[in-house]
Amino acid sequence: RARKGTMTHTKERRDYFRINDIIGLSYTELTGEEEEKYPDQSGDMGFPLANLLSEVDASFNNVANTVWKEEPRVAQALGLLNRKISLLAAHVMQADGSLADSYEDIIVSLSGCGMGFHSNEPLTESGRLRMNVILKPSHVEVSFTATVVSCEALPPEKKHAYWVRISIDEGNDAAQEQIIQHVVQKQYSSIAISKS
């Protein structure tokens, strides 16, 4: 299903799929001086295999969407095969030591315009963050800047203290495109699995 999402409060609203997903996440709060140090780096993150896999996934998704209209069973088989290859690639990259150990695996609500996640520390509304995300199972690393939309305190009986919502800043086009591709692929895989 699609929900409305915004990159900024003034930009025209656009539909994005939203999924609950497990990702690797680390972030840093930015001050004014630090913001200039972190341009959008998602197109060249020093992970050649991960980047190549992401490009192949984007092409695969375009072809699979076309095939789905004509031959749903063939598209389903291709989707499962692609998932299997992604899992194998993730295993190879982990054995290679290509991935950072500083990421916390966390369940998020993810879309092409931002995400929601639990936090044990309060984040300032309208504050800026440097986000580092590892998408799974492809283990593509995506880095971008984001703005805190809200930080809601949760009841004391909850495991985490806050629910944080962030919006991806404009100018992070490569990161946003990778996240959109990831969300669409996950959505596509879940449809294919549910129809099997």
Image: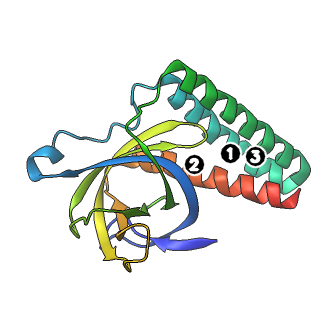
Q: Position of residue 143 (x, y in %)?
A: 37, 42
Q: Residue furthest top?
A: 96
Residue 69 in view (yes/no): yes
Residue closest to the eye, 129 or 48: 129
**Mark toward the start of the polypeptide (3 vs 2):** 3
Residue bearing the label numbered 3: 64
Q: What secondary structure is marked by label 3?
A: helix
Residue drawn at point x = 39 percent, y = 30 percent: 44
Q: Which x, y percent locates residue 152?
A: 33, 76
Horizontal and vertical percent position of residue 83: 72, 40
- The kind of residue tagged 3 is Ala
Q: Quadrant of residue 20?
A: bottom right
Q: Mark 1: which amino acid?
A: Asn
Q: Is residue 71 visible?
A: no
Q: Could you tell me which secondary element the residue under label 2 belongs to?
A: helix
* Disc 3 residue crowd, few under 14, some 14–19, many 20+, Cα 10 Å: many
- Is residue 187 rendered to the left or right of residue 175? right
Q: Which residue is mark 2?
A: 181
- Near mark 2 (Cα within 10 A), the count class, few <14, some 14-19 or many ≥20, is many
Looking at the rendering, in which quadrant would you find the C terminus?
Answer: bottom right
Q: Quadrant of the N terminus?
A: bottom right
3 and 1 marks in contact (CB < 8 Å) = yes
Marks 1 and 2 in Cβ contact (< 8 Å): yes
Judged left or right of residue 183, residue 6 is left
Instruction: Please give left or right for residue 154 compared with residue 106 in the image.
Output: left
The relative height of residue 90 versus residue 127 in the rendered view (above or below) is above
Element on which disc 1 rests: helix
Q: Compare residues 131 and 104 and report the one nearer the observer.
A: 104
Q: Which residue is mark 1?
A: 61
Q: CA distance from mark 3 to mark 2?
A: 13 Å
